[in-house]
Image (tube, rainbow, N blue to C red):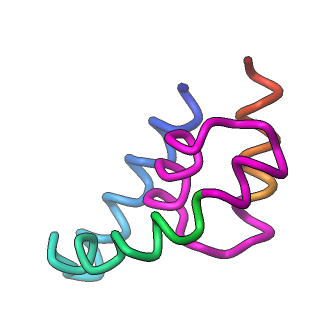
Amino acid sequence: MKHIAALTVSRQRKRHMAGDDRKAVSQMEPDVELHAHRPARDTDISEGEARELIKLIGTDWLSLLREARFLKSRH
């Protein structure tokens, strides 16, 4: 979970630097639900973990796959 915490800090810094607000995050919620099933299924992480990764790094499939595999290897 240290890796997820580091990603959270990094993402928050980027959001702050770009001037984004919480509204942008809430608009992403439907995408999170839509995309969480596949990385959970393909990498054997929970859908909750997949949703958290999507919230942190977005919906880029290769990035999600890489981070999900890393997360799984840490368990």
- Figure quadrant of residue 13: bottom left
Q: Is residue 45 magenta?
A: yes
Q: Main secondary structure of the magenta part?
A: helix
From this view, report whether residue 52 is shown above or below residue 22: above
Q: Which residue sits at x=46%, y=64%?
A: 33
Image quarter (top left, top right, bottom left or bottom right) of the C terminus: top right
Q: How many marks?
A: 0
Q: Please tell me which residue lies in front, 42 or 4.
A: 42
Q: Which residue sits at x=47%, y=48%?
A: 52
Whether residue 48 sits left or right of residue 12 in the image: it is: right
Q: Position of residue 54 (x, y in %)?
A: 53, 60
Whether residue 40 sits left or right of residue 18 in the image: it is: right
From this view, report whether residue 3 is shown above or below residue 27: above
Whether residue 66 sits left or right of residue 13 in the image: it is: right
Q: Please tell me which residue lies in front, 1 or 15.
A: 1
Q: Is residue 22 magenta?
A: no
Image quarter (top left, top right, bottom left or bottom right) of the N terminus: top right
Find the magenta span and give its range: 37-64
Given the current orientation, which residue lies at the most extreme top position?
75
Q: Which residue sits at x=37%, y=69%?
A: 14
Q: Which residue sits at x=35%, y=76%?
A: 28
Q: Position of residue 71 (x, y in %)?
A: 71, 34
Whether residue 62 sits left or right of residue 3 in the image: it is: right
Q: Position of residue 4 (x, y in %)?
A: 52, 38
- Figure quadrant of residue 72: top right
